[in-house]
Amino acid sequence: MGKDVIVACDFASAEQTFAFLDKFTGKKPFVKIGMELYYAEGPEIVREIKKRGHKIFLDLKLHDIPNTVKKAMAVLRNLDVDITNLHAAGTKNMMEAALEGLTREDGTRPLLIAVTQLTSTDQESMERDLLIKEPIDRVVMHYAKTAKEAGLDGIVCSPLEAGKVHASCGEGFLTITPGVRFADGEVGDQKRVMTPAQAKEIGSDYIVVGRPITASSDPVAAYERCVREFCD
Ligand code: C5P
């Protein structure tokens, strides 16, 4: 899989999701299904979107004891998604167990990506609530290296961190980066943003774009603009 734009389908129902996806009559976008949509509609929404020919990033961010995550991943592998994820904070043991669970009998599996520190966690809350005293960028890089050692395929990170992650974990270690905005667009609640062209420049492998596409008056044109800026 090469560079691609993943559209965050942060909708509350299958109906809204299909009304949105029906607009795409040409290239079928790579779709991210998050907790909101998955918990509303269950695994059927994944099967249905797959049947329509989209690649899928199932963003459920698993985090539990290794045995539970392994068994949950063994269920998810049957959904035939292309990418799924977990929290690196679950430790290397949990990540290794997850990979085992995700691997099908024929040796194939979806890509497995780690979430490091959520962008909603800042230095202050990390120190106060988690008692982690190291600088947050060091923590993020440490989680990335642990994920790589566990055999994972990459991490979710800010596009600003993608270059550093590649330098430390290798060019082949995937960086999936949200927080993307058009130069002339609304920033909204995202704090540290980059344009698709800048994300390409810095070496992101996939950008995750939600509202700049889903809330646009012309979602197909906004998607095509992202693809032009990021992939071409
Ligand atoms: O609408 P917007 O482009 O901000 O959507 C970004 C998507 O990426 C959302 O689904 C959001 O949950 C997700 N995400 C993020 N920041 C992270 C991790 C995931 O914005 N650090």
Image (spheres, grey):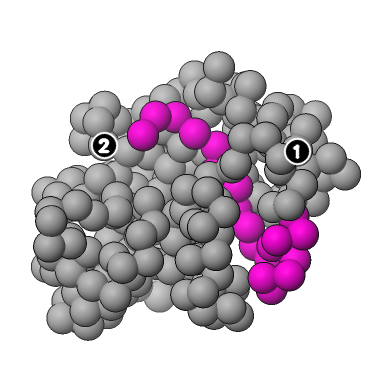
Q: How packed is label 2: few (under 14 Cα within 10 Å), some, or many (20 or more)?
A: many
Up the image or down, 25 lies above or below 79; here it is above
> For the residue marked with disc 2, what is the amino acid?
Phe
Reply above or below: 3 against 139. above
Picture quadrant of residue 194: top right
Queried whether the magenta region covers residue 198, the answer comes back as no
Where residue 14 appears, as percent x and y from the top left, is 67, 70
Task: Kindly identify the residue that appears in the image at 62 percent across and 35 percent down.
Answer: 27
Residue 91: tell me if it is visible: no
In the image, which disc is placed on residue 220? 1
Seen at 62% across and 22% down, the residue is 229
* Image quarter of the N terminus: top left
Say few, some or many: other residues with alpha carbon within 10 Å of mark 1 (under 14 / 14 to 19 / 20 or more): many
Residue 173's disc number: 2
If you read the primary sequence from the N terminus, does the residue marked by circle 2 or circle 1 appear first? Answer: 2
Q: Is residue 46 visible?
A: yes
